[in-house]
Image (spheres, rainbow, N blue to C red):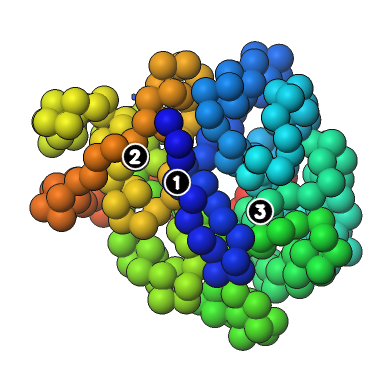
Amino acid sequence: MKVSDILLNDGYKIPAVGLGTYQIRGGEGYHQILAAISDGYRSIDSATNYDNEGIVGKAIRDSGIPRSQFFISSKLPGKYHRYDDALSAIKESLARMGLEYFDLFLIHWPLPKRGLYVEAWKALITAQKLGLIKSIGVSNFEPEHLDKIITETGVTPAVNQIEIHPYWINDNRIQENLKRGILTEAWSPLGRGSDALKEPIIQKLAEKYDKNVGQIILRWHLDRGVVPLPKSTNLEHQRANLNIFDFSLTNDEIQAINALNRENGRIDGQDPNEYEEFE
Ligand code: A2P
């Protein structure tokens, strides 16, 4: 199944679905990533804090598929927000992956209480100029954090990766990203396998479109202009999660899923203004 591409604000293209890799580690993880690549995944979303950059890079190299066909992302941990630390951390990430460049590199969390994310952003801009990264972006940034980095550097992120799933639809932040020309990526797009997958409306749509519940939720993301990064260790699910380009939801169906939103719907209650990243 061919995955469509989406144009970013810097002229590069990103596949419309990518593989999430949180908690995919070690030998078993290596084989899962290799299987996903052979199923057609080319976009793989890693992070230094996932402790899996080594196996992601190894799976890419061992796949025999040219590097140029991949879209590889990683993320800067909070302890390296200072400019010099951030630049070294990017180089270390590349060395762990065994790659010459990242297609996308994000600041993992803004950590506004520490107040160093503008420095980190400046380091990403430098790394981009050095050819270490093609597209630069952020994750879990609130509109005020976006405005601060844009105002202080004149450089708008290409991507903001945030939590989105049927219990946390995050409409406002998607709109705020859009206003600034920033593409939204969704982490935990299936709600990390929560009850969302069992919701009657989603099961009804799965029957209507002859798809599984995961595919309905992923299509809901695409139809809202969001790039989902689903994670699955089940080969059948991995394959199904790419097979979402032959149907689309009506506006009413999108609204019906939006109605599942909950006021406290975050999976782990991670408020980007409060969340202090694990070190
Ligand atoms: P599994 O690994 O058995 O496929 P998220 O991407 O939001 O973190 O969610 C990941 C969870 O969703 C995992 O528990 C995964 O289980 C499950 N999952 C992934 N794809 C599907 C699918 N197509 N249908 C049902 N569950 C899925």
Picture layout, residue 160 above or below residue 190: below
Look at the numbered disc 3 and give the secondary structure of its residue.
Answer: strand
x, y percent for residue 275: 55, 54
Q: Amino acid at mark 2?
A: Phe
109 above or below 210? below
Disc 1 crowd rating (10 Å Cα; few below 14, some 14-19, many 20+) is few
**x, y percentage for residue 200?**
12, 31
Query: Badge 3: how crowded within 10 Å, few (<14), some, or many (20+)?
Result: many
Pick the residue in front: 153 or 109.
Answer: 153
Q: Which mark is residue 104?
A: 3
Disc 1 versus disc 2: distance between alpha carbons? 8 Å
> Percent position (x, y) of residue 109?
60, 57
State yes or no: discs 3 and 1 in contact (Cβ < 8 Å): no
| Left or right, residue 46 beside residue 61 | left
Q: Earlier in the sequence, mark 3 or mark 2?
A: 3
In primary-sequence order, the first of circles 3 and 1 is 1
Can you identify the residue that label 2 sits on? 245
Tell me the residue that label 1 is attached to: 4
Residue 259 visible in rendering: no
The answer to whether residue 122 of the structure is visible from this angle is yes
Residue type at the position of mark 3: Leu
Distance of mark 3 from mark 2, alpha carbons? 23 Å
- Say what secondary structure mark 1 lies in: loop
Query: Is residue 83 depicted above or below 26 in this figure?
Result: below
Q: Residue at x 75, y 57 (%)?
A: 133
Are the residues at dot 1 and dot 2 in contact (C-beta closer than 8 Å)? Answer: yes
What is the three-letter code of the residue carrying label 1? Ser
Image quadrant in which you'd find residue 212: top left
Marks 3 & 2, CB-CB < 8 Å contact:
no
Local secondary structure at mark 2: loop
Q: Is 92 on the left or on the right of 39, as rendered?
A: right
